[in-house]
Image: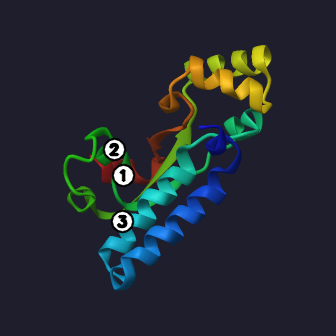
């Protein structure tokens, strides 16, 4: 968990590369597009150190797959079944209640390794992420 706080994007880059190489020829198929969608989703929603700075960012996420819905479905069905008719863009936001808790934890424990260890005992990983919100330009595509 602590590694995720410090090396989110680098760790995701490595993981995507390793999985992509294990896919071989399938990497150029729809399977590769699904892998890319999941990794880009994670790059967009996961918060990492420094939390104060990354909570201020509101990156957007564009995909041909509704990865958030797939995650909410606990991946019971293949991601391919969450393909959208056209690529869609979501913006992101940290829920105000999560922001308040994270800011309180930073004030109490700090953002160093020992303090972050206390984060993992007092918060769930799902609380350390941005949520996706339909971007205004694609709101009609979602309905």
| SS assignment at label 3 | helix
Q: Secondary structure at mark 1?
A: helix
Q: Going by the picture, which residue comes out furthest to the bottom?
A: 25
Kindly check if marks 1 and 2 are in contact, taking CB atoms under 8 A apart as contact.
yes
Residue placed at 68% from the left, 35% from the top?
55
Tag 3–tag 2 contact (CB < 8 Å): no
Residue 104 lies, in percent from the top left, at 71, 15
Q: Which label is found at residue 67?
A: 1
Q: Identify the residue at horizontal 63%, vertical 50% (top origin).
A: 8
- Residue 80 rendering spot, x and y as whole percentages: 24, 62
Q: Is residue 61 above or below residue 22?
A: above
The CA span between labels 1 and 2 is 6 Å
Give left or right: position of 90 versus 116.
left
**SS at badge 2:** helix
Residue under pointer 3: 34
- Quick check: 35 above or below 72? below
Here the colouring is rainbow
Instruction: Report the Cα–Cα distance between label 3 and label 1.
Output: 9 Å
Residue carrying label 2: 71
Q: Are marks 3 and 1 in contact (CB under 8 Å)?
A: no
């Amino acid at each position: 968990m602590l590694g995720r706080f410090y090396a989110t994007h680098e760790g995701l880059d490595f993981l995507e590369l390793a999985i992509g190489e294990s896919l071989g020829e399938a990497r150029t198929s729809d399977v590769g597009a699904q892998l890319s969608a999941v990794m880009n989703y994670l790059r967009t929603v996961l918060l990492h150190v420094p939390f104060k700075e990354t909570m201020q960012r509101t990156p957007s996420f564009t995909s041909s797959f509704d990865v958030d819905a797939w995650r909410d479905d606990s991946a019971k069905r293949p991601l391919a079944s969450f393909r959208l008719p056209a690529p869609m863009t979501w913006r992101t936001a940290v829920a105000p209640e999560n922001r308040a808790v994270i800011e309180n934890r930073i004030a109490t424990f700090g953002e160093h390794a020992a303090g972050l260890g206390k984060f993992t005992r007092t918060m769930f990983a799902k609380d350390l992420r941005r949520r996706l919100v339909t971007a205004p330009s694609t709101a009609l595509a979602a309905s």
